[in-house]
Image (cartoon, rainbow, N blue to C red):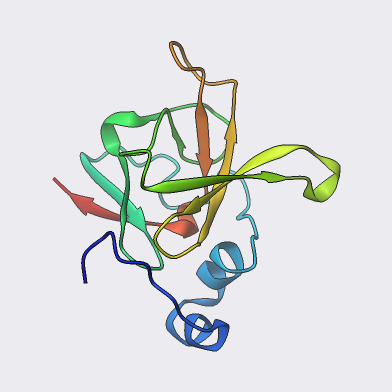
Amino acid sequence: MTHDERVEKSEAEWQRELSPEVYAVTRLKGTERPFSGKYYRHHEAGTYTCACCGAPLFSSQAKYESECGWPSFTAPSGDERVALAPDTSHGMVRTEVTCRRCGAHLGHLFDDGPPPSGARYCINSASLGFVDD
């Protein structure tokens, strides 16, 4: 299977395959506690992948310290890697970021990031894996 092929599984399959925390965040659109994720202060060179399907999502070169409590990136590895959708849950208007390959909830996109784009992809560590360069 390539990283471009769509991954379709039942919720029961996802629940069996993922840890309770990863399932709650990626499949139920949960959020880990701020400042608690394993990749929050992670500074290794490599690629951040989807915790559910392994698709490459973000380069370590796009990661920066936003001090928001979650790993932050200026851009995905490519526009085809993530999908964006309006999220009006919790009385807020946000942009949800999901894995285009498997639909996993990753986090949210905000417009308070660094220049030139101003993008801050605020991503849950529980939604990510990591592969060293």
Using the image as rendered, state which of residue 50 and residue 65 is in the foreground.
50
Examine the rendered structure and indicate whether residue 28 appears above or below residue 17.
above
Q: How many marks?
A: 0
Judging depth in this view, the residue of 72 and 96 nearest the camera is 96
Residue 108 coordinates in the image, percent (x, y)? 59, 42
Residue drawn at (31%, 63%), measured in percent from left and top? 54
Residue at image coords 33%, 30%: 62
Q: In this view, does 10 lie above or below 56?
A: below
Specify the quadrant of the image occupied by residue 93.
top right
For the N terminus, the quadrant is: bottom left
Q: Where is residue 85 in the image (x, y as percent from the top left)?
A: 62, 46
Which residue of the protein is positioned furthest toward the top in this rendering?
A: 116
Residue 30 in the image: state x and y as whole percent: 65, 60
In-image side of 39 versus 93 (left or right): left
**Front-most of residues 58 and 80:** 80
Q: Quadrant of the C terminus?
A: top left
Which residue is painted at 64% across and 67% down in the image? 28
- Quadrant of the rendered structure where residue 76 is? top left
Residue 51: x %, y % from top left: 39, 63
Q: Which residue lies furthest to the left in this view?
A: 133
The residue sitting at 54% across, 28% down in the picture is 67
The answer to whether residue 29 is left or right of residue 12 is: right
Looking at the image, residue 93 sits to the left or right of residue 52; the answer is right
Instruction: Tell me if residue 35 comes above or below residue 50 in the rendering.
Output: above
